Image (cartoon, rainbow, N blue to C red):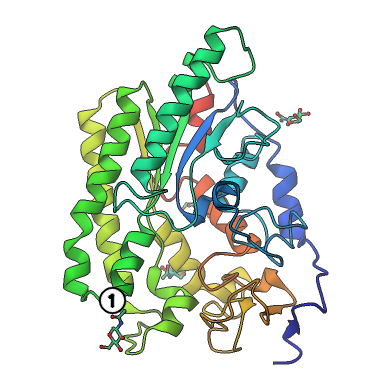
Amino acid sequence: MASFFSNAHSSALITLSPLLLLLLVSAAESQCTKKPVIFNFGDSNSDTGGLVAGLGFPVNPPNGRTFFRRSTGRLSDGRLLIDFLCQSLNASLLSPYLDSLTGNKFTNGANFAVVGSSTLPKYVPFSLNIQLMQFLHFKSRTLELVTAGSESFVNDEGFRNALYMIDIGQNDLADSFAKNLSYVQVIKRIPSITIQIKNAIKTLYDEGGRNFWIHNTGPLGCLPQKLSLVQLKDLDPYGCLSSYNAAAALFNEALRRLSQEMRSELKDANIVYVDIYAIKYDLIANSTKYGFSSPLMACCGYGGPPYNYDIRVTCGQPGYQVCKEGSQFISWDGIHFTDAANSIIASKVLSMNYSTPRQKFDFFCRS
Ligand SMILES: *[C@@H]1O[C@H](CO)[C@@H](O)[C@H](O)[C@H]1NC(C)=O
Ligand SMILES: *[C@@H]1O[C@H](CO)[C@@H](O)[C@H](O)[C@H]1NC(C)=O
Ligand SMILES: *[C@@H]1O[C@H](CO)[C@@H](O)[C@H](O)[C@H]1NC(C)=O
Ligand SMILES: *[C@@H]1O[C@H](CO)[C@@H](O)[C@H](O)[C@H]1NC(C)=O
């Protein structure tokens, strides 16, 4: 493995792949006629620096090495899916709500997502419910400032036309498994998770929000972290944990049905459900087609094959090992995806092939 992995301090040199450069260039084409405003709620899959801003909890290099060339608090070597989606609108990347030093005054929205967040328990930072409460405060304070004459902040119309994105649930499932609950016990908790998401959509709707973008959860059983921690492995044909993936799929089915219900209940709302699971599972199952070599191995971690994950030496902690070419890996740190993987995931999301209803991502900022 010596040629594959370099020591933590020996190599920080990374190159941008031509594919990524292409994506960056084409991302400048936006159909938006209104300034896009986005509010996002979620966990580490879409945390653009909230954990660091909120708790000061360090996210060390090599996180960020590929794209930002410094750690931004994102758990990836580069951009997250939400960053690529913002770029597709030619919009600035979303600042974490808790970032008091943000330069843009949240003129294009705010990101409430924080690493580790789940829907339950409800009153623990930074659960979905707490993120919602933060949003309600943010909104009333912002509108106060607008009334007082501040023009740069999002106004009432901006809140109404904004896109409300939700990407949460992975930690609810993962935490349940981690507590040694049986598969049956884990799936019994699914309705209590999805009801939280339903309540969040209703709250935002009652506040005037009409545009929703819901990501379902990825194949939990394909994460190198889970694969390395679970002792008794029930593996599927691609080497992923069947029970974990089955639970994720059941959660997604509940979320899909919920989205459908909400669509008929809230007639004037646009609720788009995006099948992230299918995108990620395809990426892993057909990894070579997409140019990835070891779909179940983390680029940054410890221990080498098969998973390069060790809970005692995680990415950025003393002693970690990191691959040379992150662009050949799907998994960055055993839990989160690389810039290269997120770029492909984003292009799939933008294709509409995985969206119900088939709605372009920029639907909310076109008139
Ligand atoms: C994208 O944003 C940049 C910088 O704000 C601007 O110069 C450019 O015209 C925008 N492009 C499109 C296609 O909206
Ligand atoms: C989970 O169960 C396994 C095997 O029964 C046991 O070794 C482990 O300590 C348990 N973990 C927790 C967190 O209870
Ligand atoms: C892998 O790719 C093939 C061909 O495109 C597709 O039919 C199949 O569904 C993919 N596998 C998964 C698990 O998505
Ligand atoms: C979306 O689906 C169309 C029609 O099946 C296909 O031609 C296209 O390649 C797909 N795009 C992506 C990004 O999967």
Relative image position of residue 201 (x, y in whole percent)? 31, 35
- For the N terminus, the quadrant is bottom right
Q: Residue furthest front?
A: 56
Relative image position of residue 165 (x, y in whole percent)? 44, 40
Q: Residue at x 27, y 67 (%)?
A: 247
Look at the picture and state if 128 lies above or below 38: below
Relative image position of residue 37 (x, y in whole percent)? 54, 28
Q: Residue at x 38, y 61 (%)?
A: 171
What's under tag 1, amino acid-wise? Ser
Q: Which residue is mark 1?
A: 243
Residue closer to the observer: 154 or 57: 57
The image quadrant of residue 149 is top right
Q: Residue at x 29, y 48 (%)?
A: 122
- Count of number-bearing discs: 1
Whether residue 158 appears in this view of the structure is no
Local secondary structure at mark 1 = helix
Residue closer to the observer: 138 or 329: 138
Q: Viewed as shown, does residue 9 lie left or right of 261?
A: right
Q: Viewed as shown, does residue 92 lie left or right of 358?
A: right
Q: Viewed as shown, does residue 292 lie left or right of 252?
A: right
Q: Residue at x 31, y 37 (%)?
A: 200
Residue closer to the observer: 331 or 264: 331
The image quadrant of residue 244 is bottom left
